[in-house]
Image: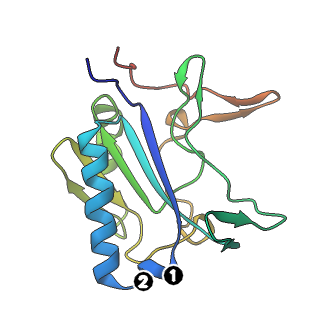
């Protein structure tokens, strides 16, 4: 039996992907992995204020961008609180986000893939602070709690 993956995330420096050819290759890779796993939810986040330190990205002090779809004892806690440059939805998330995708802001590009839908919030690689406030409904996003992140009020069923 193939293991199920709930979510996956890609974080990268955006400068390399300003070239449309590299950006298209990254998009194909991102969607192929999300479709192939298959995941419920995948994000591609452009990171800023970091440097490449030989084998990994090094965070500089004061970085406030660190966000990811956390997985807790209850499963996937929900969408990230703030927008990410690309987001892919599959399986159980599609019915939950369909209304928002049908009424997406004009700047968003929504496209179908083999197993889900890709949402590109901006044409160029853009860190979270440049994406604006448009995102998905609050009830789908993980919430901050006094002891860390709390589950979103509405989440998909986790496949077994």
In this rendered view, identify the residue nearer to me: 44 or 136.
44
Based on the displayed image, in which of its 4 quarters is residue 28 positioned? bottom left
Place of residue 30 in the rendered image (x, y in percent of width and height, measured from the top left): 33, 56
* Residue 84 in the image: above or below residue 53: above
Question: Which residue was labeled with disc 2?
Answer: 18
Counting from the top left corner in percent of width and height, residue 118 is at 29, 54
| Quadrant in which the N terminus appears | top left
View extreme (bottom): residue: 19
Pick whichever, 143 or 75, lies toward us: 75
The residue at 37%/85% (across/down) is 19
Taking 80 as reference, is 57 left or right?
right
User: Which residue is at 37% across, 75% downward?
Assistant: 123
Residue farthest to the left?
Answer: 114
Between 138 and 49, the one nearer to me in the picture? 49
The residue identified by callout 1 is: 15
Mark 2 residue crowding within 10 angstroms, few (<14) / some (14–19) / many (20+): few
Q: Whole-Å distance between the Cαs marked 2 and 1? A: 6 Å
Residue at the top extreme of this rendering: 160
Q: Are marks 2 and 1 in contact (CB under 8 Å)?
A: yes
Which labelled disc corresponds to residue 130? none
Q: Is residue 44 visible?
A: yes
x and y, in percent, of residue 158 in the image = 40, 20
Q: Is residue 102 visible?
A: no
Q: Quadrant of the C terminus?
A: top left
Q: Is residue 106 above or below residue 111?
A: below
Relative placement, left or right, of 123 versus 61 is left
Helix, strand or loop under label 2: loop
Residue 140 spot, x, y in % from top left:
49, 35
């Amino acid at each position: 039996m193939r293991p199920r993956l709930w979510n996956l995330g890609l974080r990268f420096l955006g400068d390399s992907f300003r070239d449309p050819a590299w950006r298209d290759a990254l998009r194909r890779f991102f969607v192929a992995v999300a479709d192939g796993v298959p995941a419920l939810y995948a994000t591609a986040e452009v990171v800023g204020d970091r440097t490449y330190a030989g084998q990994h990205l090094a965070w500089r002090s004061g970085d406030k961008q660190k966000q990811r779809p956390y997985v807790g004892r209850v499963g996937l806690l929900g969408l990230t609180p703030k927008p990410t440059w690309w987001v892919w939805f599959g399986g159980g998330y599609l019915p939950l986000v369909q209304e928002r995708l049908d009424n997406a802001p004009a700047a968003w590009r929504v496209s179908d893939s083999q197993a889900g839908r890709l949402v590109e919030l901006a044409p160029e690689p853009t860190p979270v602070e440049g994406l604006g406030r448009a995102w998905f409904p609050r009830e789908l996003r993980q919430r901050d709690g006094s002891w860390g992140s709390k589950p979103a009020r509405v989440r998909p069923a986790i496949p077994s």
